[in-house]
Amino acid sequence: MDETKYFKASCAQCGNHIEFPDAALGRMVDCPHCGQRTQLRVDKKGPPEPAQPATSPPPSEEETSQPSGSRINLPLIAAGCAIIALAAGAFFWKKHQAQPPPATSVSVKVKEPITNASLPITSPSPATNPPPAPTPPTAPTQPKALSDLKAGDIQLEKAKGSSLVYAIGQLDNNSDYQRFGVKIQLDMLNKAGEKIGTAQDYVPVLEPRKSWHFRALVTDSKAVACKVASIKEDE
């Protein structure tokens, strides 16, 4: 029985060695290392080596270039860094959300207690067009007396269209008082100057510093003159 020979070829894609029997020389196969299609060709570096028992696939050049204790899996490290970055971002986001918003400073002005010293002193403004103050009545300067009532000249006058005769005169109130119930009484005189009767007149109110024109009826036809007998007023 003939012994089968084995050869080694390098993958045209990844460069790893592929062991194959001599019957497969020149065939297109899938690389067991990278899975790409490659042709089984004998390396030109030297004569084929004797076949070795099948063992685990030889390590790649990158794996053999590093010591077995310090091999680094780069994809795994990159994935771990990404996970750590995401966890740190989530932590800081939650911390920021949990913190209350910064309080805004508000200035508060404390009102000082109002005292008499802090109040401004203002003078009252004069009223616009104030109404005129009522004029107080003039106080009398002298006490009231009957001597303030003065009678002037008295004349006899016959009324027109009748035979009646009146004694006409004027009585002045020379005081600052109102006089109430003023009555004047006259003596009627004949030609000899003798008293032959009386005549009188009355006024309810005589204002201060005013005059009263009295008119007393003469009842005796012989009277030719009249004179003041008395002047009275109600108390």
Image (spheres, rainbow, N blue to C red):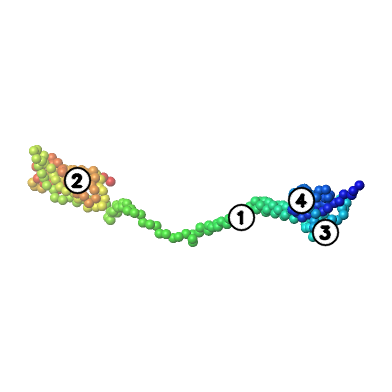
Q: CA distance from mark 3 to mark 2?
A: 184 Å
Query: Which label number is shown at residue 228?
Result: none
- Dividing the picture into quadrants, the one containing residue 92 is bottom right
* Numbered label attached to residue 102: 1
Residue at mark 3: 46
Tell me which amino acid carries mark 4: Gln
Neighbor class of circle 2 (other Cα within 10 Å; few <14, some 14-19, many 20+) is many
Earlier in the chain: of badge 4 and badge 2, it is: 4
Q: Nearer the viewer, mark 4 or mark 1?
A: 4
Q: Which residue is mark 2?
A: 184
Q: Amino acid at mark 3?
A: Gly
Q: Nearer the viewer, residue 62 or 206?
A: 62
Secondary structure at badge 1 equals loop
Whichever of labels 1 and 2 marks the residue nearer the N terminus, that label is 1
Residue 195 visible in this rendered orientation of the protein: no
Q: Residue furthest bottom?
A: 117
User: Would you call the spot at circle 1 few (<14 residues within 10 Å), some (14-19), or many (20 or more)?
Assistant: few
What secondary structure is marked by label 4?
Answer: strand
Circles 1, 3 touching at the beta carbon (< 8 Å): no
Of label 4 and label 3, which has the lower sequence position?
4
Asked whether the beta carbons under mark 1 and mark 2 sit within 8 Å of each other, the answer is no
Residue 39 marker: 4
Q: Which residue shows up at 69% across the image and 52% down it? A: 86
Whole-angstrom CA distance, mark 4 to mark 1, is: 71 Å
- For badge 1, the amino acid type reads Pro
Mark with earlier residue (3, 2): 3
Label 4 and label 3: CA atoms lie apart by 19 Å
Q: Element at badge 3? A: loop
